[in-house]
Amino acid sequence: MIAILIMAKAPEAGRVKTRLCPPLTPMQAACLHEALLLDTLTLVRALPAHRYLAYSGPRLWFDRHCPEDVCLFEQQGVDLAERLDRAVRFVLSQHRPLLCIGSDSPHLGSAYLRKAAERLVEHPVVLGPALDGGYCLVGLNTYQPLFIDMPMSTDQLLTKTLDRCRALDLSAGLLPMQGDFDTWADVENLRSKLDDGHTLRLLEVWDTPPKL
């Protein structure tokens, strides 16, 4: 059975979704981050999988809100690349293959995750390209050094990752491109892809753009 890993930050005002401010306040951005994370957990729990969540920030929120069938562990590392590398390596030591997604991924949907798992039968690496030049999903059959010294959170991430796959003689299966919840324009564009849940209900009580 496949493993699914969520990389997540605690929903602290001023530390998450900062590119949404303005039009959101830091507190509103944290509320949106929390809603997306809760819906991502719902998505993952609907699939037959070993479920993991690697968290950063205070653990209290995760102890209160994560179901018992999600294995929690703290991220370790000096930057995102190292934290991702260590988290992926740990989960793959327990179960494989692996799909890794971010905490703002409910719009991907279960069909997208199932397709990623299917592509791992054909490829050792699967990537879900993002519109901003990064990726929203990475799938691995076994551990591969795809993260260290990579330009995380830049528009070169996908290109550089594909370059490294070629250097390692790894074929990479690409999924359809997806958006991210980084700006308010992104939120408006992706809203129609959300199922009923915490995020959609939160957006329904806000104006567009929300009043501060």
Image: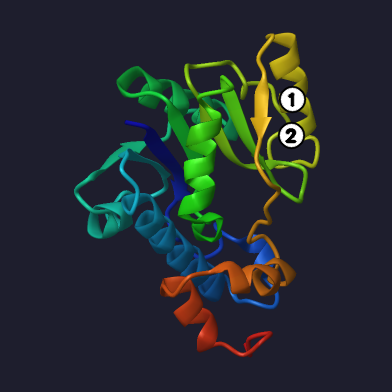
The amino acid type, in three-letter code, at marker 2 is Leu
Figure quadrant of the N terminus: top left
The residue drawn where x is 54% and y is 48% is 112
Figure quadrant of the C terminus: bottom right
Residue 124 rendering spot, x and y as whole percentages: 56, 19
Disc ID at residue 158: 2
The reply, left or right, for residue 133 in relation to residue 170 is right
Which residue is at the front of the view, 28 or 180? 180
Residue behind mark 1? 162
Residue 145 rendering spot, x and y as whole percentages: 59, 16
* 129, above or below 202, in the image: above
Label pair 2/1, CB-CB below 8 angstroms: yes
Q: Label 2 vs label 1: CA separation?
A: 6 Å
The amino acid type, in three-letter code, at marker 1 is Leu
The residue drawn where x is 74% and y is 71% is 185
The reply, left or right, for residue 174 in relation to residue 203 is right
Tag 2 secondary structure: helix
Which residue is at the front of the view, 17 or 41? 41
Which residue is at the front of the view, 4 or 26? 4
Which residue is at the front of the view, 146 or 190? 190
* 102, above or below 22, in the image: above
* 135, above or below 84, in the image: below
The reply, left or right, for residue 14 in relation to residue 8 is right
Q: Residues within 10 Å of mark 2 (few under 14, many from 20)?
A: many
Tag 1 secondary structure: helix
Residue 190 rendering spot, x and y as whole percentages: 64, 67
Residue 6 rendering spot, x and y as whole percentages: 43, 43
